[in-house]
Image (cartoon, rainbow, N blue to C red):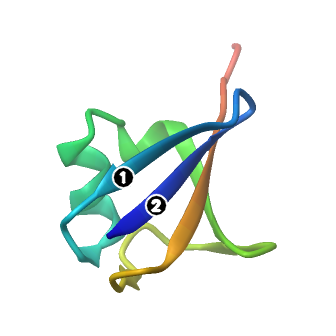
Amino acid sequence: MVKIKVLPDGKILESEKEGKIIEILRDLGIKPDTVIVFKGKNPVPVNDKVNKDEQISVLKVVSLG
């Protein structure tokens, strides 16, 4: 099971799916272009893959213009 920590609120989501991060985010109703994804402390592209038992963090970003 992939664990997804949503920042800044710290909410933990889980997904049975593994594979491309972009697909997991879409399945969870998260728009990939509204977040920055991290594995540990390192940012990763949404096209990276995630395996079972991994944890990623997603930081919601807001663009004002």
Q: Quadrant of residue 35?
A: top right
Residue 37, relative to residue 12: is it above or below?
A: below
Circle 2: element type: strand
Residues tagged 1 and 2 counted as in contact (Cβ below 8 A): yes
Residue 39 percent location from the top left of the image:
64, 75
Instruction: Give the residue drawn at x 31%, y 61%.
Output: 22
Q: Which residue is mark 1?
A: 14
Residue 52 percent location from the top left of the image:
33, 82
Residue 54 percent location from the top left of the image:
48, 79
Of the numbered discs 1 and 2, the one sitting upstream in the chain is: 2
For this view, does 46 lie left or right of residue 19? Answer: right
- Outermost right residue: 41
Q: Quadrant of residue 26?
A: top left
Which of 16/50 is in front?
A: 16
Which of 62/17 is in front?
A: 17
Q: Amino acid at mark 1?
A: Glu
Q: Amino acid at mark 2?
A: Lys
For this view, does 23 lie left or right of residue 39? Answer: left
Residue 5, relative to residue 17: is it above or below?
A: above
Q: Quick one: quadrant of the N terminus?
A: bottom left
Instruction: Give the residue drawn at x 42%, y 80%.
Output: 53
Residue 40, relative to residue 14: is it above or below?
A: below
Which of 39/1 is in front?
A: 1
Instruction: Give the residue drawn at x 20%, y 64%.
Output: 16
Decide: few, some or many residues near mark 1? Use Cα within 10 Å; few <14, some 14-19, many ≥20. Answer: few
Q: Quick one: quadrant of the C terminus?
A: top right
Q: Which residue is mark 2?
A: 3
- Outermost top residue: 65
